[in-house]
Amino acid sequence: MPAGKLTRGAKPGQWNLSARVSLLPGDLVRLGVEDEPGHRVIKITRAVPKGGRLTLTFADGPRPESGMPAFLIDRRERGLMEKIGPLESALAKIPEREAKPVEFSPVLPKPRKAGRVEPLAISVWRHPDMRKEKGTFGVWVSTKRAHNLPLQRAATVWWWLPPVIWPDEESEFVSLVAAIVSRGGKRFVLGAPWQTGLFPKGGKGVDFWAGPFCNIANPLALGELARLGFAGAFVTPELSGEDLLALPALSPLPLGVVYKGAWPLGLSRVLSGEVKTCMPVISPKEEGLWAVKYDRTYWLYANWEMDLYKHRDALEKAGYLVFADLREPMPKEVTKRERTSHFNWEVGLL
């Protein structure tokens, strides 16, 4: 946490730390950026109020530069230590156990019998145009845009839950999911396996698919999903081409894959005040990034898309049954690059 800035003191060898946050005795503060000349970590010995000044003297080592930033890197608050103390005492009473090697022989699940099923391609929208979407499609579930959800076609839509649902918005998603189910919604793509708990009666009568953000990448994980009652899974598109093509033959569940569209670089609860949503952020390498907020989560996207379309025939022959295209609306202020990402199709993970 940024904690202030150093300036030269009145006497030689003295420095003043102007605190932008309150500092407590025992706080550890890093002066400067790591590997920067004069970088060091100091321990605060007295309370310094926000806006206050702490005078420091350095008798040895490289001296810091004027204007060097200071960062709060550790704090041992008294209340926290009072809570930790009893836990440490209880832990000390537990006898130590000798660590032994784990002997485990994995048993792969029995692959499903592949029948002749026509592969399905779906577009996954934030705001579907109901005048154009006549067939099956997917929609991201959003509590802030609940009034725009196509509930009149709930039975045929693939309902995608976000990969992150924060504790303070769980109740909103519970209510919205119940509304979708009551209107006939039955196929849900989950952002994480625990999201089955958002459904009434444990999701009885509902088909759960593990979404691509569950990071499913091997038959053992697929076997566990099958044990939990999942109907299918979208595997992570970050696997190598070789691994993606090999997985359906080993899977106990029907599989889908994201083969096109906007793949987020990251998700966050907070966003720097210097970044404005739906506005481009350009790196020194001239690579573009933009952020958009859905519910309480910021999604970060590059200004180019992923595209495994040219491998679709191979993926179909391997046994994939559902192909998802993530249709993320790009802000008009952001310039879309023609380049696309193939993830690790050619290079593999390692």
Image (cartoon, rainbow, N blue to C red):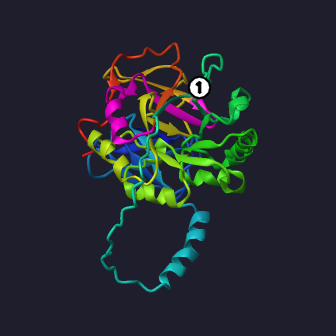
Q: Amino acid at mark 1?
A: Gly
In the image, what residue occupies the spot 65% across and 55% down?
Answer: 197
Please give the name of the residue rendered at 69% of the width and 30% of the height, measured from the top-left corner.
Answer: 153
Q: Nearer the viewer, residue 25 or 35?
A: 35
Q: Nearer the viewer, residue 37 or 259?
A: 259
Residue toward you, 176 or 96: 176
Residue 321 can be seen, yes or no: yes
Pick the residue in front: 321 or 27: 321
Mark 1 sits on what residue? 135
Q: Which residues are magenta?
A: 293-321
Residue 34 in view of the camera = no
Tag 1's secondary structure? loop
Q: Is residue 318 magenta?
A: yes
> In the rendering, at what x and y percent does residue 227 appear?
51, 61
Look at the image and say whether residue 178 sits in the magenta stretch: no
Say above or below: 155 vs 284.
below
Tell me the residue at 60%/21% (across/down): 133
Q: Please identify the quarter of the rendering in which residue 50 is found.
A: top right
Residue 137 horizontal/vertical position (percent): 57, 29
Name above or below for residue 260 compared with residue 202: above
- The x, y position of residue 202, in whole percent, is 67, 56
- Could you classify mark 1 by the number of other residues whose Cα lies within 10 Å: few (under 14), some (14-19), or many (20 or more)? few
Q: Is residue 252 left or right of residue 294?
A: left
Give the quarter of the image for residue 221.
bottom left
Question: On the picture, is 45 further left or further right than 86?
Answer: left
The percent coordinates of residue 98 (x first, y second) are 35, 83
